[in-house]
Image (spheres, rainbow, N blue to C red):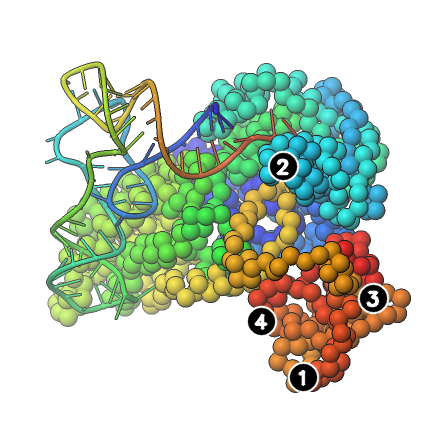
Amino acid sequence: MPRRRLLVTSALPYANGPIHLGHLVEYLQTDIWVRFQKLRGHECRYMCADDTHGTAIMIRARQENRSEAELIAQTQAEHIQDFDDFGIEFDNYGSTNDAENRVLCESMWQSIRAAGLVVEKDIEQLYDTETGTFLADRFVRGTCPKCQSPDQPGDNCSSCGQTYTPAELIDPVSTLSGAQPEVRTAGHLFIELEQLHAFLEQWTQTGTSLQPEIANYLQGHFLSEPLRDWDISRPAPYFGFEIPDFPGNYWYVWFDAPIGYLASTQQWCDQHNRAFDDWWRSPDCEIHHFIGKDITYFHTLFWPGMLRTAGYSLPTKIHIHGFLTVNGQKMSKSKGTFVKARTYLNHLQPGYLRYFYASKLSSKVDDIDLALDEFIAKVNTDLVGKFVNLASRSAKFVSHSGLSASYPEDGGLFAAAATAGDAIAEAYEACDTSRAMRLIMGLADRANPYVEENKPWELRQDPDRAAELQDVCTVALNLFRQLAIYLAPVLPDLAAQAGVLLHDSITHWDQAQRPLLGTPVAKFRHMLQRVAEKDVQAMVEESKTEEIPANSEGGTDNAATWDDGGEALAAEPLAAECSWDDFMQVDLRVARIVEAEHVAEARKLLKLKLSLGGGHTRQVFAGIKAAYEPEQLVGRLVVCVANLAPRQMKFGLSEGMVVASGPGGSEVYLLSPDAGAVPGQRVH
RNA sequence: GGUCCGGUAGCUCAGUUGGUUAGAGCAGGGGACUCAUAAUCCCUUGGUCGGGGGUUCGAGUCCCUCCCGGACUACCA
């Protein structure tokens, strides 16, 4: 088999939120594929990076009163730790804000300019004068111009379905500041993608780079009519790279994000003294992108167009996967099924999820479902009951003697499993890991009866049959080792443990072709604990109490989903209608927490000092001890009831109330005003 | 509405270019074993392959039609 050179990427996670189980579908699928290629002896490099630019990052950094650089550095460190703990091995993990990316963006830009693809057009956009920013559609809400429904998103009405531009909204409001935005005109640069129409038609429809349903989708939705110009610039302020020949304007995040694939490769090449062009300008190198179906459009139209224009290699294959559902539904915070990578790791081992995803994923774009009870049953049955059990039930009988010197008669089991290696490899190669797992477990199903029939536990009773015992265990352990090799891309930790047990590390797929003989056998230790239902439940419970970033959209990563249940409303039905005057009797004010401390004797209370600005302060006792640490409160803005009658409490006078939602205990959520609010402002 | 994907045993799914009595794993029932993480092994109950038409000597597999479920439906792309 000729040695292939492969460059593999996963989509870049947006640096505005933590990695969750939905993200991991992609990174685990890719990691498994990469590990498979490496195990086959190919040179395969896995590149990724954080996607760091765009309005959402800028806004969040402002809200948190820190620089974008600080925010994205912290997020990147968290992402890398999460990936690392899941056994996802990148060859390089960069950032789209790295210097290499700027250089490559500029060079890409020059090529696109030189090709005559760029035009400037004026567009009208809503502008928030308070925050000094142009507003993307999702930052505007207002009344639908068609059906008059209030408080609708900036692009279409959730009530009547009408689509419109934010400027058409009646009484538009900026969600950043609450201000009424004004319409302003600004020049934007556009890429005339239509000039590449013929190329894209040919590339998407006749090549082998796309799954057939994706090619159909593109033909039906985009290629059947002229391609629209792509708005590629954003006026300041914007967090990104400034466009060199268009000062005051920045590349839209979706321009520089995929170039991050190149930049990450560049970093790796620099560190390893390798030639960049061997990867991105060589017909000998395969380029494989793994992405989710939500970002199909960018990767199958714009990205090939950019690459071709700048003279880079085109993707060999774009592997597109579906979304994750949990228990058959979208991930839901209230159900505790919106699980962060870190939360999972707090309760469960990564191998469980790696195997479960592998057993579900195929080369199709279908969504996959993580049914938690199926997850428990499948992992325990397949991995512990069938696979690990083979070693667990035979290793200790040969810990003193080691494996036999020649391979015993086994009824053709080893040879059959060796032959099956090709079919398993084909399945991995095609990203059909569910098929691969099925084939592997079929082998395990034939291995256990062998042990059953040969009864090593009886053989060991008879010293005269020691050789027989050794032979039976040699077969069982070699069958186990074959499975460990075939599973190594999915379960690298178990493969390593198998290597330790048999004193022969697993480094190549072809090791499954020849039995291992004559090596010592180490003392057997449990390789994988069974999944306990209580741990899964604990993970779900913890997920219910966690904060989820309110807006994880805005970058190139739109994988977040939500599904708001009706439990909260049902638990506390709406109160009777009140008049405007009634409402205005309650004086809600923005306040800043300037001091926060524990009250030694109090079980539920924290003592807060609120500032209303201008030196006006209030002492408030709030029942939020179980939900917040004093340190995390100091400095943040909250909303307080400023005209509530003071109340004498056991520990002192409470001069107001901080508003929060939630059932109580550790589930209390303080309300925060958006950036721009200042202490003392009244809430209307 | 349009496009795409799917509808096979209680559950998750396999079923290659149409070919003998439709399969696996799990779950359920019965038994065995005790080396192994209440693991394993043997036997076993479950299906008019969404409905209806058609092509064919023969269809889960091809064609038509209807029903059901899901995804997508860009234009901040």
Q: Nearer the viewer, residue B38 or A8?
A: B38
Which mark is first along the chain, 1 or 3? Answer: 1
- The residue identified by callout 1 is A600
Above or below residue A37? Residue B16 is above
Name the element at disc 1: loop
Q: Of discs 3 and 1, which sits in the foreground?
A: 3
Name the element at disc 2: loop
Quadrant of the drawing holding the N terminus of chain A:
top left
Name the element at disc 3: loop
Host chain of mark 4: A
Task: Compute the Cα span from label 3 to label 4.
Answer: 27 Å
Q: Of discs 2 and 4, which sits in the foreground?
A: 2
Which mark is first along the chain, 4 or 3? Answer: 3
Task: Compute the Cα span from label 2 to label 1.
Answer: 51 Å
Quadrant of the drawing holding the C terminus of chain A:
bottom right
Which mark is first along the chain, 1 or 4? Answer: 1
Q: Left or right: A416 with respect to A173?
A: left
- The residue identified by callout 4 is A665
